[in-house]
Image: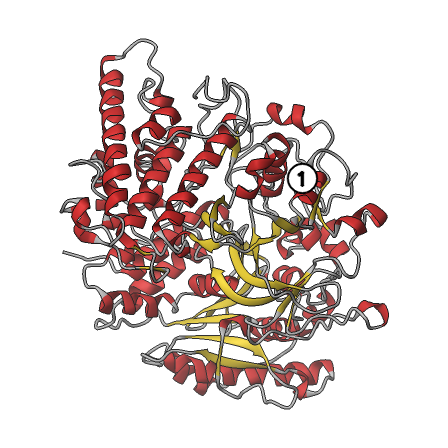
């Protein structure tokens, strides 16, 4: 019996996720010009070189016994070719300052390397190790002529998988055991909804979807080897490079003995050049190496706003951005959004002209009327300054005409968002001032993404620069993500909720201090010039969105059981208020999105965070299926999780499930269960290891000390409520009960019954007749 390795599963998963968005056989000169900014005339000169490689050294290279033996001779070939280019172009040989570095690995030698910008005095052939945040380009070596049978993933398997990824051949995964299991039932509601199933577990601080390798039966040894082999793939290296900072794109080479393919990765797509053999066409490799080496930092996809130190705003001109400056340590560096960058290599304007999308460029700074709506006065009443409301006029009427969700058709109305300014500056100038909240020093990572073509959400813990150029003592959360351009901004959702919800609820919503978005055209993403045949099937337009908000404590940091219960209840009630009054579904409830705000008197308030997957609903349209399943698997409603598990390519649209408010209520129950099993409130710690015994034994016997009352008074009655409602729903659907409403299991599961089950009287928020209609 063949056992599929976790590495194989990982690459297949990545193939499935990115397969609709891969583009192939791009002319190598076009690739070098549009991606690396190589001048075409220079490229043609290099391609016309009559250069050769030593045939004896090539023969020895082909006879290498492992990928590790390919790197040293390849780098020697590279240095020889760059020397030939230097002579051809009459430039100093030491002008090429990039050095080749092995990817650091403590267990076994890697078969991957990176090109990183070195000091001018450092020879390019020097070896060393580098952090992926410094990797300018990535190189993956593979040898297709042999097979290491003792390897965890055989060389032939690896070659096949990488060739599949680069060539575009689809891999159609079969339903896994987990999917087959979920298709039948979910153990969370079998035998009384004891707990989360271990197979649904993920690293909840950093991930939205589980890797199947996380449930490997071999435990630590196998997982460790899977992580090591994960580094060996160009695509996974690119994913790690993108996640290491706020990288906008990553490029590299897949070198299969003598066959070379240039690859481009970003949150929109994977683009691969036509492959060539450098033993037969060394001039092509010379051109590629020259383009990669002379590519600037900004041209290599590094975020120009990420700097090793903040700009000196007191300097003439407000400080200058050094395009060659690089960040070697992400912690301690700064994001400075106080300047507008221009990509070196190909000007932004030139790249934008090359675009073929016809998409809408827009700037989320939204220079509108800062006094519009209730938002400005709301913020002032909270004695906090930051985002000024600049939403589109008439939004209160217009939003009801929107269908907001994943996979929207291009051309849907898009709303302006907010201006990250001090309120006084905004009213005076309606433009960002030098001392606006646009600079943030990074203190720590809160979340790093692990997907490639995706939202790629990265969250940093930061300090904000104050008008006196010092950094604040209090913390903020800085989020960078790539949502679909058709999706309503999280800022718009929060602005809307603050306009329509009572002021007493505003502390339960995240406090925003800065936001800005860039379209692909504004970022001058290189693929805009590649003349790709883009369609709805192979391309989804995304935007880069930056959002800074107040930093809140995690739910397990509540400090006491009473504080935890209050924070959880606040989030339950504001979730219902947003749905009942604001007509907004959150759709992504997890333990990381229920936050805690500590008050000066020692009490706490629950804050419902991360509204970027929220959806506006209308009475008749609230049952409209979404194209993508949203949520964090361990906390997703059971029927949504089952639909996602069965969501194979051939049935993708037909099995999409609508999202109802009861799904959010179900997620809140799972969060409560998870907390009871994993939170140590006294030490403000969360146990990261999944409590697997709870799936087999009584939940009441497995909860953490202090949670016994929560399990008895809240979890147990909620379990009965949901189990009864689900059984009723199954029976009603089986017999075709007339008038049955699946959104509430036929009225069996409502907010009123949810609160009654835990013996809590819901607040009315000062709204007359608020609870007379309970959706």
Question: Residue 624's spot in the image, x, y percent?
Answer: 46, 25
Q: Quick check: 193 left or right of 563?
A: left
Q: Nearer the viewer, residue 171 or 362?
A: 362
Q: Quick check: 563 left or right of 736?
A: right
Judge whether 389 appears above or below 246 on screen.
Answer: above
Residue 539 showing in the rendered view: no
Q: Nearer the viewer, residue 636 or 254?
A: 636
Q: Quick check: 417 left or right of 76?
A: right
Question: Residue 766's spot in the image, x, y percent?
Answer: 55, 27
For the N terminus, the quadrant is bottom left
Q: Secondary structure at mark 1?
A: helix
Q: Nearer the viewer, residue 394 or 154?
A: 394
Tell me which residue sits at (35%, 21%) in the image. 742
Judge whether 769 appears above or below 58 on screen.
Answer: above
Question: Residue 120's spot in the image, x, y percent?
Answer: 66, 87
- Colour setup of the view: secondary structure
Q: Quick check: 583 left or right of 714?
A: right
Judge whether 302 appears above or below 554 on screen.
Answer: below
> What residue sits right under mark 1 in the picture?
378
Q: Nearer the viewer, residue 130 or 640?
A: 640
Q: Quadrant of residue 500?
A: top right
Question: Residue 278's spot in the image, x, y percent?
Answer: 51, 73
Q: Going by the picture, which residue comes out furthest to the top?
A: 738
């Amino acid at each position: 019996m063949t056992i599929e390795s976790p590495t194989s599963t990982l690459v297949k998963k990545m193939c499935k996720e990115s397969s609709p968005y891969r583009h192939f056989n791009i002319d190598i000169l076009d690739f070098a010009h549009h991606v690396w900014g190589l001048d075409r005339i220079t490229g043609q000169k290099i391609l016309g070189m009559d250069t050769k490689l030593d045939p004896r050294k090539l023969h020895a290279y082909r006879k290498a016994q492992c990928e590790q033996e390919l790197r040293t001779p390849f780098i020697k070939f590279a240095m020889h070719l760059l020397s030939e280019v230097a002579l051809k172009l009459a430039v100093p040989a030491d002008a090429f300052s990039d050095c080749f570095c092995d990817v650091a690995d403590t267990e076994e030698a890697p078969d991957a390397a990176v090109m990183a910008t070195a000091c001018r005095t450092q020879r390019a052939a020097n070896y060393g190790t580098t952090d992926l945040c410094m990797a300018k380009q990535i190189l993956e070596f593979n040898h297709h002529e042999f097979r290491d049978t003792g390897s965890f993933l055989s060389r032939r398997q690896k070659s096949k998988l990488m060739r599949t990824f680069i060539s575009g051949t689809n891999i159609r995964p079969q339903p896994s055991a987990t999917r087959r299991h979920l298709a039948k039932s979910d153990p969370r509601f079998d035998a009384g909804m004891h707990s989360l199933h271990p197979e649904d577990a993920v690293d909840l601080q950093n991930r939205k979807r589980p890797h199947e390798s996380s449930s490997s039966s071999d435990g630590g040894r196998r997982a460790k080897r899977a992580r090591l082999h994960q580094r060996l793939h160009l695509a996974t290296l690119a994913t790690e490079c993108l996640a290491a900072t706020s990288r906008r794109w990553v490029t590299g080479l897949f070198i299969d003995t003598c066959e070379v393919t240039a690859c481009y990765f970003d949150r929109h797509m994977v683009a691969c050049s036509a492959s060539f053999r450098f033993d037969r066409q060394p001039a092509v490799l010379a051109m590629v190496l020259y383009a990669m080496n002379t590519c600037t930092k900004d041209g290599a996809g590094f975020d120009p706003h990420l700097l090793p130190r903040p700009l000196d705003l007191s300097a003439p001109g407000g400080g200058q951005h050094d395009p060659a400056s690089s960040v070697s340590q992400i912690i301690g560096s700064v994001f400075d959004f106080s300047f507008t960058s221009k990509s070196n290599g190909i000007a932004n304007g030139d790249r934008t002209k090359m675009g073929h999308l016809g998409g809408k460029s827009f700037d989320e700074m939204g220079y509108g009327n800062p006094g519009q709506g209730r938002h400005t006065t709301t913020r002032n009443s909270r004695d906090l300054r930051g985002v000024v409301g600049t939403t589109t006029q008439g939004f209160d009427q217009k939003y009801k005409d929107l269908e907001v969700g994943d996979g929207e058709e291009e051309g849907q109305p898009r709303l302006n968002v907010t201006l990250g300014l001090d309120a006084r500056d905004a009213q005076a100038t309606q433009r960002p001032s030098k001392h606006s909240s646009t600079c943030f020093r990074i203190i720590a990572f809160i979340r790093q993404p692990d997907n490639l073509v995706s939202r790629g959400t990265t969250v940093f813990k930061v300090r904000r620069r104050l008008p006196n150029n010092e950094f604040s003592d209090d913390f903020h959360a800085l989020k960078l993500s790539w949502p679909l351009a058709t999706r309503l901004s999280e800022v718009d959702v929060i602005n809307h909720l603050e306009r329509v919800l009572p002021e007493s609820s505003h502390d339960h919503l995240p406090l925003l201090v800065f936001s800005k978005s860039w379209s692909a055209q504004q970022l001058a993403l290189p693929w805009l010039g590649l003349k790709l045949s883009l369609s709805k099937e192979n391309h989804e337009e995304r935007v880069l969105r930056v959002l800074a908000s107040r930093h809140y404590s995690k739910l397990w940091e509540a400090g006491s059981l009473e504080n935890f219960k209050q924070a959880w209840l606040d989030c339950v009630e504001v979730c219902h208020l947003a749905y009942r009054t604001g007509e907004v579904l959150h759709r992504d409830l997890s333990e990381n999105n229920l936050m805690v705000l500590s008050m000066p008197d020692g009490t706490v308030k629950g804050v419902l965070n991360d509204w970027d997957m929220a959806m506006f609903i209308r009475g008749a349209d609230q049952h409209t299926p979404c194209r993508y399943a949203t949520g964090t698997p361990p906390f997703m409603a059971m029927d949504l999780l089952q639909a996602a598990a069965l969501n194979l390519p051939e049935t993708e649209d037909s099995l999409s499930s609508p999202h109802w408010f009861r799904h959010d209520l179900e997620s809140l129950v799972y969060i409560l269960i998870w907390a009871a099993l994993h939170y140590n409130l006294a030490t403000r710690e969360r146990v990261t290891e999944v409590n697997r015994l709870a799936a087999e034994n009584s939940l009441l016997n497995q909860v953490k000390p202090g949670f016994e009352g929560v399990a008895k008074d809240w979890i147990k009655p909620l379990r009965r409520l949901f189990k009864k409602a689900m059984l009723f729903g199954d029976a009603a659907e089986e017999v075709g009960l007339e008038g049955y409403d699946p959104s509430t299991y036929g009225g069996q599961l409502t907010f009123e019954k949810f609160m009654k089950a835990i013996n809590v009287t819901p607040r009315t928020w000062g709204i007359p007749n608020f609870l007379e209609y309970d959706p």
